[in-house]
């Protein structure tokens, strides 16, 4: 007689264009088996085919859960599709899967081995159901990312304009068109700022939250909005360490045995929008806050690398945003000393 199943898990490694899927099960003897693997397109047709395949591979009367990493935005359409169909869905922070992967006897990292690891993780761990982010977070993320793209475009055009104006025989019409485009982008940026302020004003809790966060030196409304939007209100974040990893501001070292083979560097494997949003606030905090200036000077005096010190301030600012979000208390100069009892896992 076959053993009763405790759970069935579909582990999905999500990429921009495809879904690499593994399905596994755990029986009442706690025996885990990952027994099937397949690739599907990351689109509506692929989702439907995935659902059909899983229904054939799984046993309907036993619990089934879909598990995937939070991979930028590429996992979201699938998550909404599955949740809309009534399936149990869990979204896991990438660093959790990476750390779990290291415990497995797998030497090569491939899409298939990652989907296997995600399935194993789901089978071994007790996971919460994914909660769809608030509409205001989705709206703010869309428009703050649009703003980021427009700023990059304006910078590129300004550089081209400078190069054209430096020519021996600059093209007057070319310069006029470039200046028109810069002006148009400036107007669009003003529209976006108005949309952001309107969206925030319509949500009283969010408005109060952002007002509290912006008491941190160097952190303005736009930065606070990006942080909240990109983390969906810290939905999946359970610690400061997870947050810095999600932003790609965690430090990684290349090691071989007991020797270090390279200088420590930030991973840059996380959310690039979140990481980018912390750059200018860190510079402002270094200039205007004695606390963050001291952190910067201490690190520079130790290794003479200003970029490393700036990244450290970015990390500290982001951690402070998380702490203030959790405590709902405004920033004070001696905030860290007053809140020393707040642990890394708060």
Image: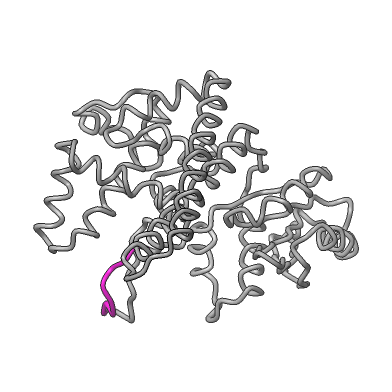
- Looking at the image, residue 157 lies above or below residue 85: below
| Quadrant where the image shows the N terminus | bottom right
Residue at figure coordinates x 34%, y 60% from the top left: 162
- x then y, percent, for residue 94: 53, 58
- Looking at the image, residue 103 lies above or below residue 67: below
Residue 335 colored in magenta in the image: no
Of residues 346 and 3, the one nearer the viewer is: 346
Residue 271 at least partly seen:
no
Residue 55 at least partly seen:
yes
Residue at figure coordinates x 78%, y 68% from the top left: 40
Q: Can you name the residue that lies furthest to the top here?
A: 204
Of residues 324 and 310, the one nearer the viewer is: 310
Residue 265 colored in magenta in the image: yes
Could you tell whether 314 is left or right of 42 in the image? left
Of residues 34 and 248, the one nearer the viewer is: 248
- x then y, percent, for residue 157: 44, 58
Of residues 267 and 136, the one nearer the viewer is: 136
Question: In which quarter of the view is residue 33 placed?
Answer: bottom right
Could you tell whether 286 is left or right of 28 in the image? left
| Quadrant where the image shows the C terminus | top left
What segment carries the magenta color? 259-266
- Looking at the image, residue 322 lies above or below residue 298: above
Residue at figure coordinates x 48%, y 63% from the top left: 99
Scheme of image coloration: one colour
Could you tell whether 109 is left or right of 166 in the image? right
- x then y, percent, for residue 35: 77, 72
- x then y, percent, for residue 129: 67, 42
């Amino acid at each position: 007689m076959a053993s009763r199943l405790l759970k069935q898990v579909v582990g999905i490694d999500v990429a921009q264009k495809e879904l690499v899927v593994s399905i596994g099960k755990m029986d009442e003897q706690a025996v885990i088996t990952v027994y099937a693997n397949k690739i599907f397109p990351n689109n509506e047709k692929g989702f439907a085919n995935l659902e059909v395949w899983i229904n054939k591979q799984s046993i309907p009367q036993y619990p089934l859960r879909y598990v995937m990493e939070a991979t930028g935005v590429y996992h979201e359409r699938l998550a909404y599709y599955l949740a809309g169909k009534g399936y149990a869905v869990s979204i896991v922070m990438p660093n959790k899967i990476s750390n779990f992967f290291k415990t497995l006897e797998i030497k090569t990292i491939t899409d298939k081995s990652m989907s296997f690891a995600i399935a194993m993780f789901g089978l071994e761990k007790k996971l919460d159901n994914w909660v769809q982010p608030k509409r205001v977070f989705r709206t703010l993320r869309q428009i703050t990312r649009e703003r980021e793209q427009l700023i990059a475009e304006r910078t590129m055009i300004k550089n081209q304009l400078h190069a054209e104006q430096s020519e021996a025989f600059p093209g007057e019409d070319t310069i006029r068109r470039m200046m028109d485009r810069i002006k148009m982008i400036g107007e669009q940026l003003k529209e976006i700022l108005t949309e952001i302020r309107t969206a925030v004003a319509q949500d009283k809790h969010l408005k109060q939250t952002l007002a509290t966060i912006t008491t941190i030196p160097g952190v303005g409304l736009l930065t606070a909005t990006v942080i909240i939007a990109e983390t969906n209100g810290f939905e999946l974040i359970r610690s400061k360490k997870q947050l810095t990893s999600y932003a790609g501001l965690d430090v990684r070292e290349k090691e071989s045995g007991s020797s270090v083979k390279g200088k420590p560097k930030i991973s840059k494997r996380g959310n690039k929008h979140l990481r980018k949003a912390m750059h200018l606030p860190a510079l402002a905090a270094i200039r205007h806050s004695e606390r963050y200036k001291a952190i910067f000077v201490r690190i520079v005096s130790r290794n003479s690398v200003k970029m490393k010190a700036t990244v450290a301030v970015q990390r500290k600012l982001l951690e402070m945003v998380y702490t203030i979000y959790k405590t709902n208390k405004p920033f004070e100069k001696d905030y860290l000393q007053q809140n020393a009892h707040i642990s890394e896992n708060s």
